[in-house]
Image (cartoon, rainbow, N blue to C red):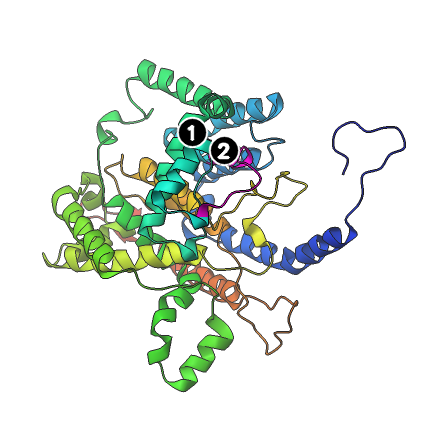
Amino acid sequence: MLHGSRNKGQREPVDKKAITEEAVNDDETVIFDAHSALNIALFPVLFFFSALFYTDVMSTLAVLLSYGTYLRRSSAVGSTFDNLSAVVIGVVALFFRQTNIFWVAVFPAGLTVIDVLKRHEPVSKSSREKDVTGKLRESWDEGTIYDCPVQEAGTQDYALFLASLAIAALRNLLLVIRAAIPYVVLLALFGAFVAWNGSVVLGDKSAHTATIHLPMMLYVFAYIAFFSAPLLVGVLLQPFVPLLPKQLRKLYSEYLYTTSKASLPGLLVSTVAILGAMAAVHFNTIIHPYTLGDNRHYVFYVFKMLRQDPATKYLAVLAYYLCAWATIQTLGSSGIGAGATEPKRNARPTSGKAAYQPRQISFIIVWLATTALSLITTPLVEPRYFIIPWIIWRLHVPYTPASLSKDRTPGKASYDIRLVLETVWLLAINAAVTHMFLYKGFAWAGEPGNVQRFIW
């Protein structure tokens, strides 16, 4: 690839070794990419509604096109075409669902700001050798951002990242504003629509009033854990592997081993998180009239179980916490090659330091913040509302060298058995849901003769 203007006849040196390694890396992971794409297409909620002509398929497509536009930006601040595309595709996504504003504006804006600040960092830095105060001072003096891999991060690392990001952004405010212009335009257009419409939604405004519903951030982790159980089981078992019988440990090491340095959070962090979640459940659980008023939906039966005993919803918090921990740790695995988690070089040029790294805590923070904004503002628990958070998370789950065979030759990517288990699991759910829909219809007493069918 040629960069900039050069004298006639002068060629840029070609790093044949780098090109060969990249080609081998792509060849190793192309089958994983295809298999992951298949599994995402089989995602039960989206798969089911694609047969009922709901808007969710096109809504999700528009959001993914918007994300693809971000990934293909020709520079950190984006060209005129890049920025115009982001606005146009973002507006199209808003026609399908107004809450997409968070995924077409806030999400890419957060990633873009981090990208542009990382590209603006000095070539050499020694943050690891400094204390917290030194790192924050460096953020102000040089505009650096403290970022580290998920598998190495503790609570203090997330706090330090946020502080350093705020300081670096203030130091380079004009650069940040320039990079975020297309997303600011989208937010402005959306704000004008809300002012004109008098509400965020176009439909029944009384049934979709914006509110604060914090337990939604607990439900989303349970949702991810249920549909992605084969991807999370390795991480969930890892801390307890030493306690397993020898034969089970052998099976784990051969088929479910992940390279994530998964360790349970400290007692203080766990206590604060669980108590906070219990407070949210106690004071802020909202059960929308639609949820308990329609027994055709599976959510009706979930909340029926949670309401059977007053203690059930509090005990569920422990499950939510484990699901949240496993969801984050699954992103922290060191995958096979680049996998689906890192854009190809010909799709989005990056420098070594500014390279897009989904397994960094920066990505986790942006994903969590966007998910929270899109979910906690709605009182209705709808499986369809969790589709995009799940897909964005799933796109960035790295492949791990859990092998279908005994061959683990160094340099050779062994197949990730989790993908196979995931396919079987998703097909089983789809088969069960389809069977319930087609053959387990029932009639309401008030509407005899009309067949009611189970749906998400």
Residue 453 seen in the figure: no
Badge 2 element: helix
Q: Magenta span has 292?
A: no
For this rendering, which residue is in front, 104 or 135? 135
- Residue under pointer 2: 117
Residue drawn at the location 40% of the way across and 26% of the way down? 170
Position of residue 1 measured from the top left corner of the image (x, y, whole percent) = 76, 38
Q: Which mark is residue 292?
A: none
In the image, the segment drawn in magenta is 111-127
Residue 78: give x, y in percent of width and height. 58, 27
Mark 1 neighbour density, 10 Å: few (under 14) some (14–19) many (20 or more): many
The reply to whether the magenta stretch includes residue 114 is yes
Residue type at mark 1? Answer: Ala
As drawn, 285 above or below 330: above
Q: Is residue 387 left or right of residue 40?
A: left
Q: Are marks 2 and 1 in contact (CB under 8 Å)?
A: yes
| Circle 2: residue type | Leu
Circle 1 — which element?
helix
Q: Residue at x 60, y 35 (%)?
A: 72
Mark 2 neighbour density, 10 Å: few (under 14) some (14–19) many (20 or more): many
What is the x, y in percent for residue 275?
Answer: 16, 52
Quick check: 203 left or right of 291? right
In depth, the one of 132 and 192 nearer the eye is 132
Label tally: 2
Residue picked out by circle 1? 169
Name the side, left or right, on which 112 lies relative to 436.
Answer: right
Location of residue 204 with respect to 136 vertically, above or below: above
